[in-house]
Image: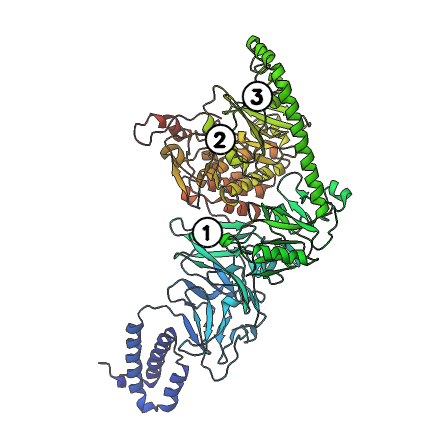
């Protein structure tokens, strides 16, 4: 036993202070304010009782130490400050609150971040607009229940607004395990008086709301950071507009930038936040007290929605296995997403022309419309009469118009909704409010129909039109039918007369004279056509195809691939097209043909080649595409003469366009697609050198971010195939990422991966790029033709991204969304790991894979 008499008075005081400090620490961790208790002991205990006090405090210290164990501190009491360098942690060790510096900034902010995720992922910032320039910051709770941040000489730089004003309280602040910082009225955690969830930053967490409290008038919305290093309020804001029928809007500054269509009972029209995912459940509530959007989790994962500094909105979940955020869904604002792109009554589509008028409407300003300025939109051809004389024109397959000038009723039937719109002369359209249970409720529009775009949504919109307009349309249709009947009768009467002659001629018809493949179709039976169901994709007769290509003349042939020869054709209306014909010797067949038709017909993106139609005639299978003036990327890239025509800005634009196109395939299209054959020959270039991805014969659909499939037949092109696909037959979106990485390195260097050679080593192009990167000489990979146009920082960044994409293990490669973000930002990139097929010798493994004799035997690859 230690005798206190052995200590000096100074030593006794030191020991006492030590134990009191320990006592304070333990009680801080257990949400008890020890300050008053400590002062009470010091004020009322004389020196003669201090030995007893030291013994008591020591006993209390050890008691609370063993009682509290290593539990995290998640609560603070009034005037119990958190200084810069200290923090509190939620009970489940999920979130941490303290001071931090974002990115490369030296400024200090109070924020909340995921405790176990690296790099630092911040979800909320208090003093966004008032950073602290040193480490003097201090965060505390006042006895009135207000949170505040102090700095330097204790000036208040930020404070919370009380939601509920109360008296005689003993407040405590607590960081919850969902990331919400809350203030309770007392230590029993009763009566919530403030919460950070009511004041979101750039991140929406499960349980957090975007909306409006109709009682207090308080709005909750997301606002972007200015940059990755600056959390102050940026350009973009995502909010729920309460006017009319509530809908989500994105603002850029003070301008309406983009709009998400109204809620239909299951999801928002216009896509981004669907309610069908396995991870989360969407809730959209509108009542007398509040209106809001939020999501809750179905499973225990880290999930968030974030609005980036550049306006991209992402939904992502943390994947523990790969230690990275996997993008679950995102909104990337395209041309048709821009609010009001085609003006009133205009429909936007990612095609050419981009805008069209609703049937029964015409351009408001024809001259501007023809010159490409379509913002004035469309006007009615016939004015409304109002009342019972007006009728409704039904359309579908569009995102519903802006609902800020609308009204709604949740209990009306469809018939009652139509009557309500017919009776009101200001009503311009109506629709069912809720698509569930065969439709219910009523949504009425009372102004010009604005911001409509083509969209895969089958819900019907009923637009009010003048009776005379539809009558004229009906008469036109009737006249067409009448003409068809007359022609049919005439033809049938003549058919009997000529049938015998036709039969005799057909019997005597000579076989087609073969002069190469070009004249194969000098004569044929143009009525013998095998039709198949490919949805709304136009069918072209063999007669039209043969006429367009001059009977498949060799002079019209512009290329040949694994599918077969490709011809330039000119249709009757003068439109130039590319016609791809399945070769008799092609290793592809009906499955690949059907796969390409089904896949690409449902995909619409500026960086995907557009399929115009198809033809099936006997054994002939033909696809008709938009014509690309500059053919394929490889015709420029690997040609010594033409490669000099591709300067760096054009090449960087091609890289970025390819990335956007692949991102659309993987994530934003209604069919999620793995291409499986990305290569320079399948990147076509239009007349402005914009890239368009083609050849979807090997593409496969998938569902979910981590979807992986296995096949015993590996097909594709040497030099572009990922190792897990080549060796084990496993393919996923990361297989396309690998191919993209190879393309990036080929575009920068102007060299083919498979044919690359170097005088000092046997590495292929990937290995050479990796060797230069490790030596800090990446710029030496650049093609000599780029010396006069290069932007060194962009080239080095592109090489770095390319190496990240060709890493050996699929889980190490970034997603295409990450690639796009890396291309457009200046943030720090993670270091790449060793690429796959590092040397030419390792690449030769592909040639011997087919000799393996096991259940995963892989067939020989063939060039395309």
Instruction: Give the numbered dot on residue 527.
Output: 3
Which residue position is annotated with label 2? 594
- On the image, the x and y values in percent for residue 59 come to 28, 80
The N terminus lies in quadrant? bottom left
For label 2, the SS is: helix
Report x, y in % for residue 82: 46, 72
Q: Nearer the viewer, residue 357 or 26?
A: 357
493 w.r.t. 800: above or below: above
Q: Which x, y percent locates residue 262?
A: 57, 55
Location of residue 546 with respect to 819 vertically, above or below: above
Tell which circle, 1 or 2, labels the residue nearer the N-terminal end: 1
- Mark sitting earlier along the chain (2/3): 3
Residue drawn 48% across the image and 32% down it? 595
Q: Is residue 516 left or right of residue 734?
A: right
Label 3 – label 1 distance at C-alpha = 46 Å
Residue 735 falls in image quadrant:
top left
Residue named by callout 1? 276
């Amino acid at each position: 036993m230690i005798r206190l008499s052995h200590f000096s008075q100074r030593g006794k005081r030191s020991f006492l202070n030590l134990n009191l400090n320990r006592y304070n620490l333990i009680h801080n961790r257990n949400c008890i304010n020890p300050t008053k208790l400590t002062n009470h002991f010091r004020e009322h205990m004389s020196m003669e009782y201090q030995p007893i006090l030291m013994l008591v405090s020591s006993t209390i210290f050890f008691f609370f130490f063993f009682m509290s164990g290593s539990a995290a501190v998640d609560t603070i009491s009034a005037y119990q400050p958190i200084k810069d360098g200290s923090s509190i942690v939620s009970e489940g060790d999920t979130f941490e609150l303290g001071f931090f510096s974002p990115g490369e900034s030296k400024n200090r902010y109070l924020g909340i971040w995921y405790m176990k995720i690296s790099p630092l992922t911040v979800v909320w910032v208090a003093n966004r607009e008032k950073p602290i320039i040193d480490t003097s910051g201090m965060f505390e709770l006042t006895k009135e229940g207000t949170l505040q941040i102090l700095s330097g000489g204790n000036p208040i730089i930020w404070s919370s607004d009380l939601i509920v004003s109360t008296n005689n309280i003993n407040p405590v602040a607590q960081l919850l395990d969902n990331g919400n910082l809350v203030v309770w009225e007392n230590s029993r955690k009763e009566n919530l008086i403030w919460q950070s969830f009511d004041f979101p930053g750039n991140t929406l967490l499960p349980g957090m709301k975007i909306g409006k409290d109709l009682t207090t008038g308080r709005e909750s919305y997301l606002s972007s950071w200015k940059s990755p290093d600056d959390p102050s309020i940026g350009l973009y804001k995502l909010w729920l507009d309460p006017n009319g029928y509530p809908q989500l809007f994105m603002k850029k500054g003070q301008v309406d930038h983009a709009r998400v269509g109204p809620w239909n009972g299951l999801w928002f029209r216009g896509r981004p936040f669907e309610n069908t995912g396995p991870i989360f459940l969407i809730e959209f509530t509108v009542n007398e007290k509040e209106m809001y959007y939020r999501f809750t989790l179905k499973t225990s994962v880290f999930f968030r929605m974030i609005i980036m500094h550049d306006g991209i909105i992402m939904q992502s979940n943390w994947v523990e296995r790969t230690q990275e955020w996997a993008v679950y869904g995102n909104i990337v604002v395209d041309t048709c997403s821009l609010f009001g792109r085609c003006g009133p009554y205009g429909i936007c589509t990612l095609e050419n022309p981009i805008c069209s008028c609703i049937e029964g409407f015409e351009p408001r300003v024809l001259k501007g419309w023809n010159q490409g300025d379509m913002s004035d939109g469309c006007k009615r051809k016939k004015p409304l009469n109002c009342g019972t004389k007006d009728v409704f024109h039904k359309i579908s397959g569009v995102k519903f118009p802006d609902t800020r000038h609308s009204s709604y009723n949740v209990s009306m039937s469809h018939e009652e909704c139509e009557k309500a719109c017919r009776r009101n002369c200001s009503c311009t359209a109506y629709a069912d409010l809720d698509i569930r249970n065969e439709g219910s409720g009523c949504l009425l529009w009372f102004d010009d129909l604005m911001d409509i775009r083509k969209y895969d949504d089958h819900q019907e919109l009923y637009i009010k039109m003048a009776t005379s307009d539809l009558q004229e349309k009906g008469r036109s249709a009737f006249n067409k039918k009448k003409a068809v009947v007359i022609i049919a009768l005439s033809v049938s009467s003549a058919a009997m007369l000529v049938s015998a002659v036709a039969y005799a001629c057909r019997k005597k018809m000579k076989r087609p004279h073969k002069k190469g493949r070009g004249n194969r179709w000098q004569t044929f039976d143009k009525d013998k056509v095998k039709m198949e169901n490919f949805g709304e994709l136009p069918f072209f007769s063999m007669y039209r195809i043969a006429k367009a290509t001059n009977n498949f003349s060799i002079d019209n042939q512009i290329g040949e691939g694994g599918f077969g020869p490709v011809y330039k054709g000119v249709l009757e209306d003068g439109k130039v097209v590319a016609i791809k014909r399945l070769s008799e010797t092609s290793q592809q067949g009906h499955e690949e043909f059907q796969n390409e038709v089904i896949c690409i017909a449902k995909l619409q993106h500026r960086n995907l080649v557009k399929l115009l139609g198809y033809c099936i005639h006997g054994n002939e299978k033909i696809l008709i595409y938009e014509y690309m003036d500059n053919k394929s990327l490889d015709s420029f890239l690997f040609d010594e003469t033409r490669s000099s025509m591709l300067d760096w800005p054009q090449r960087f634009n091609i890289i970025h366009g390819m990335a956007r196109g692949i991102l659309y395939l993987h994530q934003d299209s209604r069919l999620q697609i793995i291409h499986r054959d990305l290569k320079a020959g399948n990147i076509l270039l239009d007349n402005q050198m914009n890239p368009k991805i083609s050849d979807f014969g090997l593409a496969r659909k998938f569902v979910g971010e981590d979807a992986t499939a296995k096949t015993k037949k590996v097909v594709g092109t040497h030099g572009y195939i990922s190792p897990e696909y080549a060796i084990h037959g496993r393919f996923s979106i990361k297989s396309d990422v690998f191919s993209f990485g190879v393309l990036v390195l080929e575009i920068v260097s102007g060299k083919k991966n498979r044919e690359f050679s170097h005088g000092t080593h046997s590495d292929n192009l990937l290995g050479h790029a990796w060797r230069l990167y490790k030596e800090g000489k990446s710029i030496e990979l650049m093609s000599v033709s780029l010396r006069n146009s290069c932007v060194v920082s962009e080239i080095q960044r592109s090489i770095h991204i390319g190496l990240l994409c060709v890493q050996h293990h699929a889980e190490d490669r970034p997603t295409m969304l990450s690639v796009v973000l890396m291309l457009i930002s200046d943030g720090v990139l993670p270091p790449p790991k060793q690429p796959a097929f590092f040397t030419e010798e390792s690449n030769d493994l592909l040639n011997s894979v087919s000799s393996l004799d096991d259940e995963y035997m892989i067939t020989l690859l063939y060039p395309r």
